[in-house]
Amino acid sequence: MKYRTMGKLGVRASAFGLGCMRFNGEASGDSTIDEEKAIALIRQAIDGGVTYLDTAYVYLNKTSEIVVGKALQDGYRDKVTIATKMPLGHVSDRASMEALLEEELTKLQTDHIDFYLMHGMDKGEWEKFKAIGAPEFFTDMKREGKIRFKCFSFHGPYEDFEYILNDYDWDMVQIQFNFMDIENQAGLKGLRLAGEKGIPVVIMEGLLGGRLSKAPDSVQALYDAFPVKRSAVEWAFRWLCNHPEVAVVLSGCNEPEQIAENLRIFDTVEAGAMDDAELKLMEDVRKAYLDRTKIGCTGCKYCMPCPKDVNIPGIFSVWNNVSLYCTDPANDWGLKRIKENSNGADKCVGCGACEAACPQHLPIIGQLKNAWKELC
């Protein structure tokens, strides 16, 4: 296992961090996970050299922290650092923040949490939590030894990321990042900004929820033609670890074979180790994925709101993702939410308001019909 020093913190962490969100194969769902199997997976990872575990209050219907706590008995707690998260929607004042932290400490069966993250922060949430005393809460909990490091996780636009990162003395940040997301969310720009400030970055969605683990034919052909043979998973992880700003790459595993494969991969990764040919391969792979784009919608939302409540950018985003990554639309959470909220393209009446507002002059009406037919 390769280890990295986490920026200004000086903490030595395994490059592979075990994500504890998918022990039943899903990020959420019912709580009927196989605890015995999950505990065995966690201990297999730790025995193999993993020192960083990531969980959250809400994962697996609030059971993930419980399973992690059980797995860390018998001396395993002393071998790892724990990252967990405050669910922003569950707290409204200082008292509720403290109560929730106490609940998480109890579930994890520990007297302290190493990395305590505000979960899924955006600028509006940060302003709200500053107003109810989050900075003071962090300071007091650190002084009492209940948390070691004050952190946040992020899924919003770069502008929000930059604002939050510069507005407080954060110890660590967790972002979604992979070779397809270099211009999405915090992106490469955000990764480098954190690195410049000495703030370690933990990576989530390095495989885009598994979508980068199985390449479509056009992408696989590029991997196959390269002189060095590696799986799509290994290429994705090596690309991430090539960035010196990356401290830990999270990977969720639900089978012992996946743990073993990750342990093998993360025993070979180094920052700056990819040569020019390998970097060009990954850029070619990215382009090959993007060539599968169905429609060039940027999600600017100038077409919104639709008079009939059709979620135009949401539908196009799902359509593109299904095409790019060869996924089953029936399993797409975004599409499920669109249908549940009655925001589907079946409500479109062809009024043309969206096309008049689109800065790219996309043929939205016709493409919405095509997208909905293919997705449904």
Image (spheres, rainbow, N blue to C red):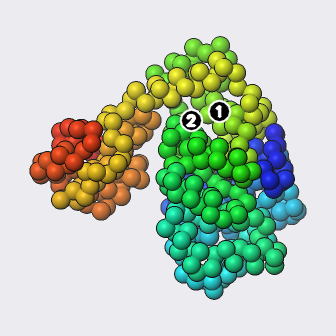
Where residue 133 appears, as percent x and y from the top left, is 63, 79
Which image quadrant is residue 238 in?
top right
Up/down of 37 relative to 356, above or below: below
Give whichever of discs 2 and 1 has the lower sequence position: 2
Binning the other alpha carbons within 10 Å of mark 2 as few (below 14), some (14 to 19) or many (20 upward) gives: many
- Residue depicted at x 30% and y 62%: 341
Gap between marks 2 and 1, in whole Å?
Answer: 7 Å
- Residue depicted at x 53% and y 74%: 128
Of 82 and 187, nearer the camera is 187
Q: Is residue 302 visible?
A: yes
Where residue 146 appears, as percent x and y from the top left, is 78, 74
- Residue depicted at x 31% and y 36%: 295
In the image, 71: left or right of 84?
right
The reply to whether the C-beta atoms of the residues labelled 2 and 1 are less than 8 Å apart is: yes
Where residue 370 appears, as percent x and y from the top left, is 22, 38
In the image, 105: left or right of 73?
left
- Residue depicted at x 14% and y 47%: 352
Q: Amino acid at mark 1?
A: Trp
Q: Which residue is mark 2?
A: 179
The C terminus, quarter of image: top left
Q: Which residue is mark 1?
A: 239
Badge 1 element: helix
Up/down of 189 relative to 146, above or below: above
The N terminus, quarter of image: top right
Where residue 361 appears, as percent x and y from the top left, is 23, 38
Q: Is residue 48 visible?
A: no
